[in-house]
Amino acid sequence: MSLPNPAFTQKFGFARADVGLGNWRTRPYSAWSFQNVAELVPSAEISTSATIEDETLEPLGPLLEQTVDVGAGSETVKSFLARSDTDTLVAMKAGNFVGEYNAPATDPAAPHIVFSISKSLTAILAGVLQDERLLDPAEPVTRYVPEAKGTAYDDVTVQQVLDMRVSLDFVEAYLDPESDFARYRRAMLWNPMRASDKVESLREVILSLPKADGPHGGPFRYYSPLSDMLGIIVERASGLRYADLLREKLWVPLRARGRCTVTVDSEGMARAAGGVSMTARDLARVGEMMRNGGMAGSRAIVSERWVRDTLSAGDKAAWKAGDFAHLLKDGSYRNKWYQSGFPNGAFMAIGIHGQWLYVDAEREVTIVRLSSQHEPVDDPLDQEALRFFEQIAVML
């Protein structure tokens, strides 16, 4: 049992002992837990001990007092950030940091979980391995994961996994404790086990999910286990553990500064679909790398060809017939990145509970918003966030 810590309680409004696997993704506890996931879930370190001193960022200052209208009436930028439970907002313009906003309880140096933005990071690793001719997206999953033979993935291609166009009998029921999704979360060690639960690894759960009716290659269907399968694929193709692969192929060449971790299950398998924690500044550096065609400074991390394919080759018909057409009516999805369909060519990576990496290529603006929203999915707030980013990009 931990000793009482009055300073902690005063800062967050609850005691550290109050936070556990049963409540860490709910307010008010998420204001702390989303910056300290490694205290709750076993995690592998991605960042290195050879840290690079980060630059000092100024507060966003006058921008916070500017007025926006995101559909709920006129309000200041600061007001929107507060009511949307934003922990950190970082903005870049033409490759330079403009400034940073941090909520009172936020430590900008602490790695914040980015949830499904992890999928987009994993896809970058797949792109690097494609460039190195270690991974062929046209090949079947079973070439890299032989034990997938005879499962729902038996006749699925790696590209179909990348584009979320797999016919799988699975529902992302975030709040249903009896669902396959809850079983999936227990296997990744994110939810507490119950006495009646069977102990399973994340890999076992992923391989056990049945195929749905209909062929693969159809509409966009958002199934997180596909991205964990991609994590297995990139490990098998490279011969490296996920954390080591991300460190070698992205973290070090990006010259990322802060800490970065990824949650792991009982077998040490990384949660490639949603377990990465990193700072907002380093996530902004990822967005800038994508905006610059795979380049981080003078170093190519992933090929311009792969970035161009990611940002332009999404199937719009598959999107319109899929799960998220309400979010971006003219959007598309390719290699686990969202294309907005907006005139400015914005693209993004998105995670539940309000995690956003938004890149306006036309205006050379990159915005990161990391949050601790109570609801995992809030469609009206997502629409407000998109309007917010568009207006901030114009102001910058």
Image: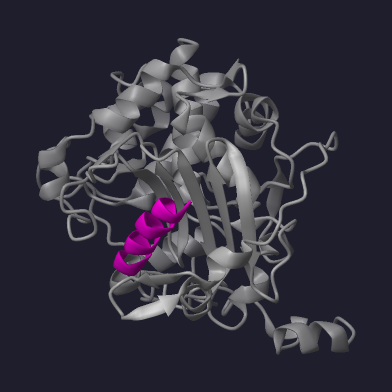
Q: Reply above or below: 386 against 137.
A: below
Q: Is residue 18 left or right of residue 286?
A: right
Q: Residue at x 20, y 56 (%)?
A: 323
Q: Is residue 21 left or right of residue 175?
A: right
- Is 232 covered by the magenta stretch? no
Between 274 and 331, the residue placed more toward the observer is 331
Between 396 and 70, the residue placed more toward the observer is 396
For the question of whether residue 150 can be seen, the reply is no
Start-end of magenta stretch? 383-396
Between 74 and 8, the residue placed more toward the observer is 74
User: Farthest residue toward the top?
Assistant: 133
Query: Quadrant location of residue 227?
Result: top left
Query: Quadrant location of residue 45?
Result: top right
For the question of whether residue 247 can be seen, the reply is yes
Q: Is residue 279 left or right of residue 192?
A: right
Q: Residue at x 45, y 32 (%)?
A: 291
> In x, y percent, where is residue 150?
28, 34
Quarter of the picture containing the N terminus is bottom right
Q: Reply above or below: 153 against 308.
A: below
Q: Residue at x 53, y 51 (%)?
A: 201
> In x, y percent, where is residue 263?
62, 52
- Is 393 covered by the magenta stretch? yes
Assign the magenta stretch its main secondary structure. Answer: helix
